Amino acid sequence: MKLEYYFDCLDGQYRFTGELSEGVLFYNIDSSIAEFESRQGRLSNEDSEVFIRLLHRAGIEKWDECYEAQGEGIEDAISWKVKLTDDEGSYVSQGEESFEPYGYEYLITALKLCEEKADYFAAAGQR
């Protein structure tokens, strides 16, 4: 399983890449947003299991079928993109702030296992 999450706003860009290997999630963060530092890390086996369960609850593979992905395409809008690759295939979804699919909050909760301030990526987050 591999997860790629991109977030773009006026403050900069954020990219999270996580890959599951032998039951452990290894991740890389690259950010130009001042609140976040670029770094690499890994989750414990237990936290990796929680991360995967949360991704399953998020239902990323269904997002593009179930909601309006984009708003008006405002040039400076806060936008996000997710790519999930697993044994079943590859799923890509994208949207703008306030156009978050059902289950997006589970993705944010999963990201919080690696990035404490991941609430920043939710429409209700503090910026």
Image (cartoon, rainbow, N blue to C red):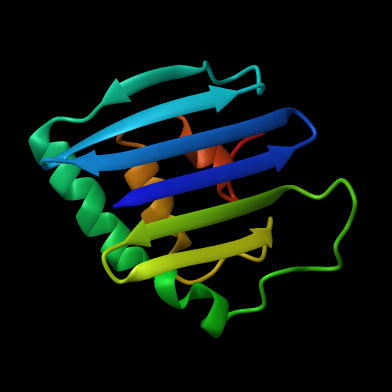
| Closer to us: 1 or 35 | 1
Above-or-below relation of 41 to 64: above
Please tell me which residue is depicted at 51% across the width and 17% down the height of the picture: 38
| Closer to us: 8 or 116 | 8
Counting from the top left corner in percent of width and height, residue 9 is at: 74, 38
Report which quarter residue 20 is drawn in. top left
Counting from the top left corner in percent of width and height, residue 49 is at: 14, 47
Above-or-below relation of 23 to 82: above
Counting from the top left corner in percent of width and height, residue 52 is at: 23, 53
The answer, for residue 116, to whether it is visible in the render is no
Above-or-below relation of 78 to 47: below
Above-or-below relation of 81 to 37: below
**Lateral position of residue 107 relative to residue 5, left or right:** left
| Closer to us: 63 or 101 | 63
Please tell me which residue is depicted at 70% across the width and 40% down the height of the picture: 8
Please tell me which residue is depicted at 66% across the width and 62% down the height of the picture: 95
Please tell me which residue is depicted at 42% across the width and 27% down the height of the picture: 28
Report which quarter residue 125 is drawn in. top right
Counting from the top left corner in percent of width and height, residue 19 is at: 31, 41
**Lateral position of residue 71 relative to residue 62, left or right:** right
The answer, for residue 45, to whether it is visible in the render is yes
Find the residue positioned furthest to the right.
Answer: 75
